[in-house]
Image (cartoon, rainbow, N blue to C red):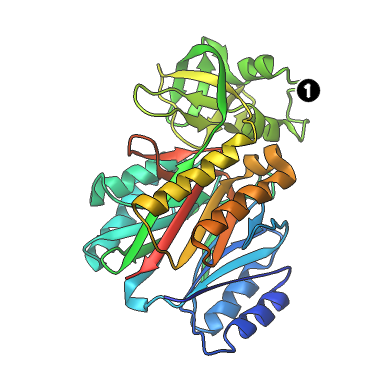
Amino acid sequence: MKAKSIKGKSPEEIKTALEQSMSDGFKPTLAIVFLSVSQDRTAISRLLDKHGIAVFGATTSGEFIDEVTEKGSVAVLLLDMKREHFQIYLEEFPENNYRATAAAIAEKAQAKFTKPAFLISGSHLETDAEQLLFGFEDIVGKEVNVYGGMASDDYTFTEQFVFTNAKESNQGIIALVLDEEKVKIKGKATCGWKAVGTEKIVTKSEGNHVFTVDGTPVLDLTAKYGGLENVSPDNPGLLLDLAANLPLQLQREKGDPVMRPGLVVDWNDRSFYTSGSVPQGSKVRFSIPPDFDVMEKVIKGVEDLKATEMPDADALIVFSCAGRILAFGPMMNMEIEGLKKVWNVPMAGMFSNAELARATGGNLEMHNLTTCCVAIKEK
């Protein structure tokens, strides 16, 4: 399989870059599209559709095809994968039936492929991404390969979209299904945010809606810990502080903790929604951002993936948490450059609201403040 990456600041620039990429006879069948919510998704989808290219798309809080990160732009990974080796589904979940929606996609995929694997993205801040993962496991089994990231919106925390050729949704899931007998896919998720303080008990929660911790409204406890001021709906920077700087760390008996930042506040009771479940009675700790050495940890993890499971790749897809670039700033380019050098193949990446992959211990989980690298190779 051949792959090429292109980028641009407008549909016109993408049109020019696409035509240049195809000038040597390259005929892509699939496009992984990461773009800003400010871009014209419809125009870009129509452009790709005109050339017979299937679209897997998500909005972002930044995008890249090399070590240079962009804002307000479009990044596209073009692949000439055989059409019989993949399928794209986009389904909505207006009733919050996340698990059932993912299971329905998995049933269709399993009817088409003996061994399906999934690259996914979802939209809407209240979505419980872990329930999506459980839906795939319910049908395909615990060993199913699922990787991806939740759509973002340039840090506005308002409306995110997933889209394909003639359809988009601000409350749905897009799934690129791969025939794993024909396409090899492997991924690695690495975090690094450090926990501080004592363990606290989640005293009331429902799924990904956390009400109280140690009997105190979770927003108030987080604000007290982080020294936040102006904790009100009038503070435009509050959600960014909660998501990027003060995430909860869900402690586990086995394996590394997973991050659970607040994304949507319910001001009636000062609770908040996270992007993954936080069971009532579970233990959490607060976090502090990592040192720069965590970038080396991410690169080392991907180097290990190449050495042990994925010696060769045709293309690389990266889902990196939007909070990471806020923490690292321009230094984030070092991490992306390091990832690119591992296989030195065409790459596209996005800064996402959550990352989906297997964690330490092997379980499928929803992550935050994490980098998830996904390598693919057509057999």
Residue at 64 percent of width and 36 percent of height: 292
Q: Amino acid at mark 1?
A: Asn
Q: Position of residue 53 (x, y in %)?
A: 49, 78
Quadrant where the C terminus sits is: bottom left
Q: Position of residue 54 (x, y in %)?
A: 47, 74
Q: Position of residue 148 (x, y in %)?
A: 46, 52
Residue at 46 percent of width and 50 percent of height: 303
Depth order, front residue of 178/299: 299
| Residue 378 image-quadrant placement | bottom left
Q: Is residue 282 left or right of residue 125?
A: left
Disc 1: CA contacts within 10 A as few (<14), some (14-19) or many (>=20): few
Q: Which element is circle 1 on? A: loop
- Please tell me whether residue 340 is drawn above or below residue 251 in the rendered image: below
Q: Is residue 273 left or right of residue 357?
A: right
- Please tell me whether residue 244 is drawn above or below residue 325 in the rendered image: above
Taking the image as drawn, is residue 352 in sight? yes
Q: Is residue 120 left or right of residue 99?
A: right
Quadrant where the N terminus sits is: bottom left
Name of the residue lying farthest toward the front: 307
Q: Identify the residue position indicated by label 1 in the image.
A: 230
Q: Is residue 351 left or right of residue 30?
A: right
- Please tell me whether residue 375 is drawn above or below residue 54 in the rendered image: above
Taking the image as drawn, is residue 174 in sight? no
Q: Position of residue 214 (x, y in %)?
A: 51, 10
Residue at 62 percent of width and 73 percent of height: 44
User: Tag count in the figure?
Assistant: 1
